[in-house]
Image (spheres, rainbow, N blue to C red):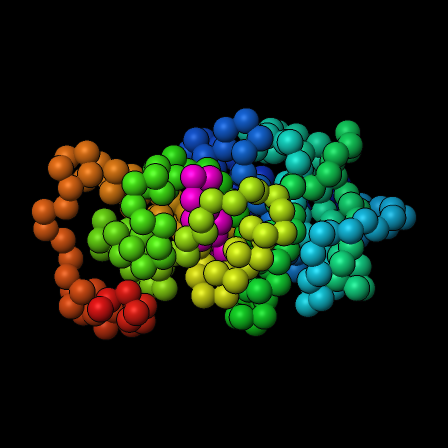
Amino acid sequence: MYKSIIEAPFIKGYARMAQEGYLKGWHERNGGNLTYRIKKEEIEEVTAFLDLSKEFVPIGATVKNLRNEYFLVSGSGKYFSNIQCATEENVAIIEIDDSGENYRIVWGLVNGGKPTSELPAHLMNHSVKKEAINGEHRVIYHAHPVNSIAITFVFPLESKVISHLLWEMMTECPIIFPQGVGVVPWMVPGGEKIAIASSELMKKYDAIIWAHHGVFCSGTDFDLTFGLMDTIEKAAEILVKVQSMGGIKQTISNDGFRELGKAFNVTINPDYLD
């Protein structure tokens, strides 16, 4: 038994990832959000710290395959810079009810507040990923990496175009995100429309770029999800520098990508290699 719930490894890992994202400069003010679908054995270890007396409130979406699950979520209006040093004030554990339409806070946000305004988008993405890959993915991460946002003002907002450009910037990119990245045109954040658009793309991709806004990534654990975001942003940074130097003069060919896929036993999206 832990003396404090924040001793639990999944909470420590969550807080460390939040701090790393803040130090990268991806979380200005209260920007960005992070959710983790807690494992059964993890929630059982902290049950004594949970308050199960609160009323359920609507999610704003229906996620039937997440019924009775628990999530660690960042708070609306909370700063990532404060999560590691004041975890209980800035994040919450929520429980989804038996209908998959409502949630309640069972721990955290001790000074009041609500989960992130992007909760419907996060939970819909969790729902899609749980269905698509047998529950392997547990982390959904949204951040505002500068270069990934910048390229959406210059290049066509098409998944194929953006994906191929990012692949070209570093040889490792098509290995790390072989399906490419999805691209969502600009929409008002926090609503049902953008949540639906994002979850549809998450059926195919592990990362999506919201035009003029930020990036959403999905992964099995904190390290892999953060690493995916970091890789995409580094590729976008190289792309910005290449453009500032006069644009691409030579690059990796499509046949080169095919050879790379064979060498690393990865299926690189063939639709993006024609």
Residue 153 seen from this side: yes
**Residue at the limit of the structure toward the left, as seen here:** 249
Q: Nearer the viewer, residue 64 or 226?
A: 64
Give the image location of residue 115, x and y in percent: 69, 41
Residue 6 image offset from top left, x and y in percent? 68, 40
Figure disc tally:
0
Does residue 101 appear to the left or right of 146 in the view shown?
right
46 magenta-colored: no
Q: Which residues are magenta?
A: 208-220
In this view of the protein, which residue sits in the foreground, 37 or 189? 189
Q: Residue at x 34, y 39 (%)?
A: 153
Q: On the rendered structure, is 111 left or right of 156?
A: right
Residue at left offset 50%, top offset 28%: 28
User: Image quarter for residue 161?
Assistant: bottom left
Please give the name of the residue rendered at 62% of the width and 58% of the height, measured from the top-left corner.
124
Asked whether 152 or 257 is in front, the reply is 152
**217 drawn magenta:** yes
Q: Quadrant of the C terminus?
A: bottom left
Q: Give residue 242's quadrant in the image.
A: top left
Report x, y in % for residue 53: 90, 48
> Looking at this rendering, what residue extends furthest in the top direction?
29
Q: Is residue 237 above or below residue 41?
A: above
Q: Residue at x 52, y 55 (%)?
A: 198
User: What is the chief secondary structure element of the magenta stretch?
Assistant: strand
Residue 126 placed where, x, y %? 60, 59
Tell me if residue 215 comes above or below residue 125 in the rendering. Answer: above
